[in-house]
Amino acid sequence: MRAPIRIKTLTIDGKEVSAREGETILQVARENGIDIPTLCYLEGLEPYGACRLCLVEVKGINRLLPACITQVEEGMEVITNSERLVKYRKMILELLFSERNHTCSVCVVNGHCELQRLAQKLGVTNIRYPYRYPNLPIDATHDRFVVDHNRCVLCTRCVRVCDQIEGAHVWDVMGRGINSRIIADLNQPWGTSDVCTSCGKCVHVCPTGALFEKGKAVAEMEKRRQFLPYLTVMRGGKQ
Amino acid sequence: MNEKKIKLATVWLDGCSGCHMSFLDMDERLLELAEKVEVVYSPLVDAKEFPEEVDVTLVEGAVSTEEDLHKIRLIRQRTKILVAFGDCAVTGNVPAMRNRFHIKEVMERVYEQNATQNHKPPVDGIPTLLPRVRPVHEVVKVDVYLPGCPPRADAIYFVLTELLEGRIPDTTAVTRFGA
């Protein structure tokens, strides 16, 4: 016998909503047409809570909670949009831009980039923090794809899709804090990876121009993600 | 305001002049603007000195040299509303791509390794490069950000007409980084 579905009721931005137990604030908000900005989150992959753009206020809790990994509770009062939240979201985006070399004008995904789109949507017209200009490599050793660390925001979508959907686990993260970096296998050139199946899923879930197909020029690369919901269904609905 | 034309200046620091091309791309709207605006200083007009009491200055390009630094400070003093005009002014953009290298490496690369003759940097008549290219707002206060590479003519027109109406424009509706 299937366990009965428990229903939780809560409010999001003053709107009364109901949710199944175990759902996250983000899922429930989206089901109810309430938009919370996200960057590392991608439907079909396990949520990770890295980017902090989906931070929301919950009444009675002093700290801000990431909506993508916070499960709903009975009687919760959630605020998804406030002056404080907008301030932090803009700060997060500006820090991402300042941390690496996102030169949008010469990027393969210019015009199709989630970071760029979020900046415009949240009203970021300039970066208030000093740019770091790190000297980061571009790895073009793979036959078909390139990883450009200058444009990586460490969302780990590539890590998760390779592990959870493709089952190859080529990608992972090395280092800590500002020195963190995405690596292939044991920190080796991508083209030398024995386990990479060249499926390209990492390329297509990447929100920026950090992963792209060879032969694409500025603004030519568009990411195709139609496969994700399908593959999730194939895996029995498990995220 | 209707009687008196506003004084507009445009300057070109470390950029490719694409933003100025986009400015010209306003086409017939330039005639309409010309009735309300006097262009007092610009690569497009013949004025040698940056004048006093300019109402609006569009700054194209990043701050890359001692000369840029000197110019932008003077411009700021003499301008009421300073617009960072295009991605180089707003973010550093392509000129700032040299920032990850030491200035010595940049000079060697350009004037020695890639030179076919005169294998040394020029010494006369060119301004000293700053160690790092910087967006305009890191050097002086900026009032309006107009990103884009280049910002479309429509976006420039929007900003200028909003300023003429006495409003500070919200540019996110019309442009973005890299647009």
Image (cartoon, coloured by chain):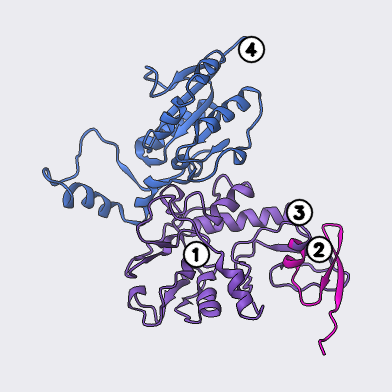
CA distance for labels 1 and 2:
32 Å
* Crowd rating for badge 3 (residues with CA inside 10 Å; few <14, some 14–19, many 20+): few
Q: Which residue is mark 4?
A: B2
Q: Chain of mark 4?
A: B
* Crowd rating for badge 1 (residues with CA inside 10 Å; few <14, some 14–19, many 20+): many
Q: Position of residue B85 (x, y in %)?
A: 49, 35
Residue A239: name its quadrant. bottom right
Q: In the rendered structure, which amino acid carries the disc numbered 3?
A: Ser
Q: Which residue is mark 3?
A: A82
Query: Is residue A64 among what the camera can see?
Result: no
Q: In the rendered structure, which amino acid carries the disc numbered 1?
A: His
Q: Which residue is mark 1?
A: A204
| Foreground disc of the pair 1, 3 | 1
Q: Colour of chain A?
A: purple
Q: In the rendered structure, which amino acid carries the disc numbered 4?
A: Asn
Residue A17 shown in magenta: yes
